[in-house]
Image (cartoon, rainbow, N blue to C red):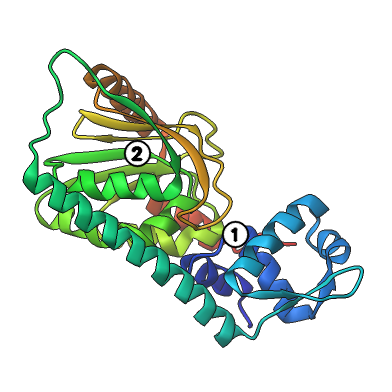
Amino acid sequence: MADDSEFLSRLISFGLSEKEAQIYLHLLKYGPKPTSLLAKSLKTYREDIYRTLSGLVDKGMVNPSLDSPTVYSAVELDIALDAALKKHESELREMEMRKQELQEISKQQHFRPSDEFSTFKILKRAGDVVTIVLSTLNSVEKEWVAVIPAILTAISSLYILEDDKKFIDRGGKIRFITDITYPYVELIQQHLDMKMEVKHLDQYTGILFFVFDKKISMSGINVDIKQVSLNEPVSVLWTDDPTYADYLTSTFEWLWEQATPAAQRIEELLKDGPPQG
């Protein structure tokens, strides 16, 4: 593994979070370790290591020992990737079933936003957000815009990218703003290659949101996603209120003017190389 940054990028595109990728690579390179040594080597807190290891164990990529203190070892790469792939395949099958159910329902009913009343609801799982995006893309005509964390580009690559491509192929436009860091360079480039327009806003901490055709919107109340999984808990407000969609669209355009083109940001990151440590 001569180029750790490339290996990390590939792991993230495969569905790991940045922290999961770092810990798994560390265990592959340096062998089994307890949480205390992992925290020291990676310069982070034990609680953070525990949470990340839990996700890796759930994915079948790390095994805990029965000793005390517990020692964690990386599962052989081929076996680990097969286990992670099976988990994603299961999630994807679930999404396909939901998509088909929504399409069947849409054939039987005619949904029309009220001219007088707007609907609001809270989405509580990353999978619910993905389901709504997939179903909404069937009716979007012109453009959707978003301000999102970079990890959502990994979720997009796994579950939404094909539908995004179909939307673009039929003349739709996609623009989004994110905070581009080194491990996500390849993923962002993948979106650029699909003719999406992407910009970088350094360490953005404001509201995260999607807006579809300036009519339907989703905004994050709590979107602290730790890993690429449909089961990640979130709190996202969905509404068909046009006034709120207009407000979010105005906010997006204001941020868009301030943001840096993704190609420029990627060039800077590749020039500087991966972060040390």
At horizontal 20% and vertical 58% (from top left) the residue drawn is 100
The N terminus: image quadrant: bottom right
Measure the C-alpha gap from mark 2 to mark 1: 21 Å
| Label 1 Cα neighbours within 10 Å, binned few <14 / some 14-19 / many ≥20 | many
Location of residue 23 by image quarter: bottom right
Quarter that holds the C terminus: bottom right
Q: Which residue lies furthest to the top in this view?
A: 116
Q: What element carries label 1?
A: helix
What is the crowding at mark 2: few (fewer than 14 residues within 10 Å), some, or many (at least 20)?
many
Q: Can residue 255 be seen in this view?
A: yes
Residue at image point 61% right, 66% down: 58
Residue 262, x across and y down, in percent: 40, 50
Residue 61: name its quadrant. bottom right
**SS for callout 2:** strand
Which residue in the structure is indicated by mark 1? 18
Residue 200, visible in the rendered structure: no
Q: What amino acid type should be assigned to the residue bearing mark 1?
A: Glu
| 149 to 205, vertically: above or below | below
